[in-house]
Structure formats: C-alpha cells, structure tokens
Image (cartoon, rainbow, N blue to C red):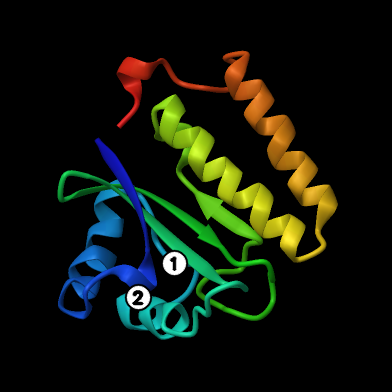
Amino acid sequence: MERIINYRDIPTDKKNDVLNALEQIGFFPAYGGVKTMQRVMEKSVPGSGPQFYFVFREDKLIGYNFLIGDTKRYKAFPWLAISNIDEQKMVVREEMMGMQVAFFEKLGMQDMANHCVRLMEDYRKEIGKRKESDSR
C-alpha cells in the first residue's frame, strides 16, 4: 500500500535519508544538492506553497510531488510543480494529481489547475500513461 507524506510530517531523523533517496528514483534539483533542497523544504508552510510530498511503498521511496507555485523564487526548484506522477499506479496518480489541482486553485492559477485536470483525463483514457505493470 502506498502512502503520500508531506515533508513536514517526516521524522527529522529520516528527512536526510529521504532526500538522498530522490536520486535513486531519478530526481535531481536544478541547482545544489540535498542541503539546498532541505533549506527550501524547511520553508514549507501548511496551507500555502511550496509543498513537498513523498510517496512510499512500505518504507521505500517510490515517488515525489513537489508543488512550488513560483518558477523564480527557488533556484533548486524552478518549476510550478514537478513529480513522477506518470510512473505511479492509477490510484496514486489520481491522489497526486488531485493535490496539484487543489494547490493551483488555491493559488488562483486556474489555467494550471485546468491543465492538471486535462492531464488526469488523458491518463484515465490511457493517453500518455504507462501500463500498470511498468509502474513503480
């Protein structure tokens, strides 16, 4: 069973291990390394951006959903959002995409929220998605 956990809810003594494991699933920050990412992630505030979610199966990191909302503010994360949604099973994909839609709506970025809705509709139609057996 997969679990999606916000960075803020990861025990302090486990955060460094989780950030180091990102490289194993193909994520690298645009600038800096683990310490740079950690400095930005520590600025995460409930109810606003940025938000950083991690997907675990048992204790193994299998995914990420980073909701930034600003392409200029953080050098390590110059994206509105970045994730590996396309590598997840449909049930996880639905939950992660729902997070993105809610995040962008809250920021007043309705065009981005609508884009996420269209992407999810495409995934449901099996456009641009992997077979379940090829998912993490």
Quadrant of the drawing holding the C terminus: top left
| Cβ atoms at labels 1 and 2 below 8 Å apart | yes
Mark 2: amino acid: Gly
Read off the residue under disc 2. Answer: 33
As drawn, the residue found furthest toward the front would be 47
Q: Secondary structure at mark 2?
A: loop
Residue 92 position within the rendered picture, expressed as x and y whole percent measured from the top left: 42, 35
Q: What residue is rendered at 67% in x and 32% in y?
A: 119
Q: What residue is rendered at 59% in x and 43% in y?
A: 98
Read off the residue under disc 1. Answer: 29
Q: Nearer the viewer, residue 85 or 11?
A: 11
Q: Is disc 2 surrounded by few (<14), some (14 to 19) or many (20+) residues within 10 Å?
A: few
Mark 1: amino acid: Pro
Q: In the image, is residue 53 above or below residue 49?
A: above
Name the side, left or right, on which 83 lies relative to 72.
left
Q: What residue is rendered at 48% in x and 35% in y?
A: 93
Q: Secondary structure at mark 1?
A: loop
